Image (spheres, rainbow, N blue to C red):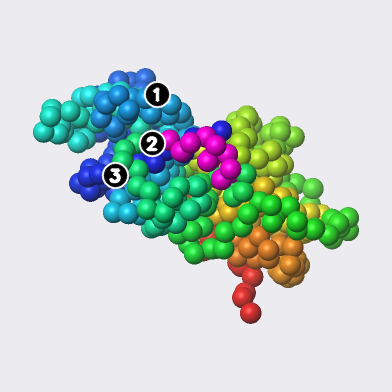
Amino acid sequence: MRKIFIVPAGSSQHFYDTIQKRRSIEEVRKFIGSETASSLNQLYHGKDFIVWGARNTEGNIRQFQKMEPGDYVIMILSGKAVLVSEISYKINNPPLANYFWSKNELGQTWENIYFLINERFISVSIDQLNKYLGYAEGFRPQGLMAIEKNKQELFEKEYGNVYDLLLSLDQGRDIKEKEEAKEILKPEPEDKIEGEAKPSEHTEIQWRLIRLGKAAGNDIWVPKNDQGKEYEGSKFRDEVMEEFQESLDVPAYVKNIDTVWKYGYQIKSAFEIEHSTSIYSGLLRLSDLKAITPNTVYPMYIVASRDRKPAVFEQLARPTFKYFHMDKDVGFLSYDVVRDLDEKFSGKSYGFTEDILKQAAEKVTSS
């Protein structure tokens, strides 16, 4: 189980120095050595990072020793949760801490340093968070703390992971309990085959999605059975993850999705390519992810030929899919849009972002 740490930001200046203001690997290389620099460069794909630290008190040392990559960090400032992120790396390094934050009046610095990834800035009342985590109204953390295991287990059993819950609260979305999700009855999948496409078209589009994901700075997953594919001499296995570690918020279902973009410990986007099978089957695989973690907010896409868009929108209007907000969260990408984006951005080290993809996708029009 990935632990949840609550961190009172304390100093707004420190929050600006290393949270709002991103730092570069080259900037800190002289403090961390080549091995750590190489690890960070691999974790962040060469991008800048955010970082936080804790003083060397007995309580902080105890909490710092518990921290592991993938654990969640929620930062509190002025009575609100203002940041949710994950730990990517940790190190005890007084010179680096002094460089970032100097020393306090007692000559101490925040030397127990943890690097953060997949950060999202939010604005959620701590009292709202307390309600979900099982703390009394008015509770305020006094220092770095881990959520008690029993509280976390109860929370995750009901709502999934805290990262998605906080994003949902920040966006004003309805919070769904997992027990509710279990009661949704899905109609039987349709076995109807809706037309044939060129045998290589699925492979081509999957390859282009791999390249676009790399251009956006992500790690890429495709199912094991697809890793041996190649397109125009390019082998999938040379560009994708060999293994995908599942967890509460990354369930085994994700291994069957046609293409998944991942960064750090979070899914960034999921794609189902539907070229010759029922549109329903792809949406059902995506809805399975929603049923397991009903408050997830990462974008999902159905990728198909343009003439299949009406069928996609028709299926998304079904109550089964609307219950999980899939009519809002699932976008339609036509093959021609994927090809155009790939030709424009793939192979470049800058320019393409997930926001560009979101803007290119078409959504069900609300009535």
31 left or right of 331?
left
Query: Which comes sooner in the sequence, label 1 or label 3?
Result: 3
Residue 44 appears anywhere in the view: no
Residue pictured at 33% horizontal, 21% vertical? 34
Which quarter of the figure has residue 109? top left
Considering only vertical position in the picture, is 342 above or below 347?
below
- Report, in whole angstroms, how far the alpha carbon at label 1 lies from the one at label 3: 19 Å
Q: Is residue 114 magenta?
A: no
Q: Residue at x 73, y 56 (%)?
A: 283
Query: Which label sits on residue 65?
Result: 1
- Mark found first going from the N terminus, 3 or 2: 3
Tag 2, which secondary structure?
strand
Q: CA distance from mark 1 to mark 2?
A: 12 Å
Quarter placement of the C terminus: bottom right
Q: Residue furthest left?
A: 105
User: Residue 104: horizontal and vertical position, in percent?
Assistant: 14, 34
Q: Position of residue 363 (x, y in %)?
A: 61, 67
Q: Nearer the viewer, residue 115 or 347?
A: 115
Give the residue pinned by disc 2.
145
The residue tagged with tag 1: helix, strand or loop?
Answer: helix
73 sits to left or right of 268: left
- The three-letter amino acid code for the residue at tag 2 is Met
Instruction: Give the magenta-colored segment's residue range.
Output: 145-156
**Overall secondary structure of the magenta stretch?**
helix
Q: Amino acid at mark 3?
A: Ala
Q: Nearer the viewer, residue 274 or 317?
A: 317
Quarter of the figure that contains the N terminus: top right
Q: What label does residue 9 carry, if any? A: 3
- Vertical arrangement, residue 198 with respect to residue 305, above or below: above
Q: Are marks 1 and 3 in contact (CB under 8 Å)?
A: no
